Image (spheres, grey):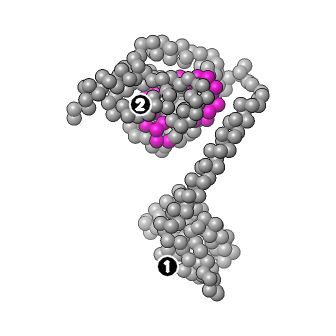
Amino acid sequence: MAADSEFCSRLISIGLSEKEAQAYLHLLKYGPKPPSLLAKSLKTYREDVYRTITGLIDKGMVNPSLESPTVYVATELDIALDAALKRHESELREMEVKKQELMELSRQQRFSQSDEFSSYKIVRGMREAMAVAAANTDLTERQVVTVMPEIIFAFDSSFGLNEVIKRFIDRGGNFRALSNISYPSIALVQEGLDVGMDIRHLDGYSGIMFAVFDRKIAASVINFSTTRPSLNEPFSGIVAYDSVYADYLIATFEMLWAKAIPATQRMEELLKEGPPKA
């Protein structure tokens, strides 16, 4: 059934395997069952059911009964989802700690540099683009400059990049951003200012969008057109590990920066004008 398939798909999206999702849904729909009947219903082997149920028990989605013979009982959906959420939150906290430890160790190490060689990578999808932006900002020591569409302020706010930028600025880094600021983005631009970004308004710019990290790494947009902050939005770009290209973009940025006005000035103008009329 389509509804069952959609339900299983949602369970898989929160970390269950396909077999775990099917077993959990079956127990929810038809009630507690012993492994033999569950195996028959799912058209599989008892050994396979035991492995699947063990995974569900570890995830807090299923519990064994106390009586004999043992039957397996599905945890109530809201309780099971709360357990899944807590598990993911814990994993994210652990990953963040490990990431910061590795980043700190990387700054202490003397890794072999390859500045004399140029290389590049293609970035596909907004999810990867945000991950690349966060990783490069964490690795940067002195300066990030970027020319970006104003929707990126919404991505930064929604998906944690503002926190990464704040850490960079707190380490003594300088983050400058140019964008064409309109009325709907005022609050989001203010968030960027609050974390320490130096932002200017660039009226009517329609050229290349890019970011440069420490005059070493240059990221430029190939294709990006969206009006909502979703990690599933289409995106393509290129990250070049090329100091010559980075210097070219820096020169372009400085030329545009000189023509731009402070974001606070632009925001004051927009607030005086009020929201655009429908």
Pinpoint residue 256: horizontal percent, then vertical percent: 45, 15
Q: Residue at x 33, y 34 (%)?
A: 184
Q: SS for tag 2? A: helix
Task: Name the amino acid type tagged 1.
Answer: Tyr
Q: Is residue 205 visible?
A: no
Give the distance between the C-alpha atoms of the residues marked 1 and 2, in whole angstroms: 51 Å
Residue beneath label 1, please? 30
Q: Quadrant of the C terminus?
A: top left
Q: Position of residue 197 (x, y in %)?
A: 49, 27
Q: Which of the two labelled residues, at mark 1 and mark 2, occupies the earlier sequence position? A: 1
Residue 238 is left or right of residue 270, and the answer is right
Residue 35 visible in image? yes
Q: Residue at x 66, y 77 (%)?
A: 46
Check if residue 18 falls in the magenta segment: no
Question: What is the x, y in percent for residue 1?
Answer: 44, 69
Q: Nearer the viewer, mark 1 or mark 2?
A: 2
Mark 2 highlights which residue?
A: 189
The residue closer to the viewer here, 207 or 261, is: 261
Residue depicted at 62% across the width and 52% down the height:
91
Camera-side residue: 102 or 203? 102
Please name the amino acid that badge 2 sits on.
Val
Is residue 133 or residue 234 the one in the foreground?
133
Q: Which residues are magenta?
A: 134-159
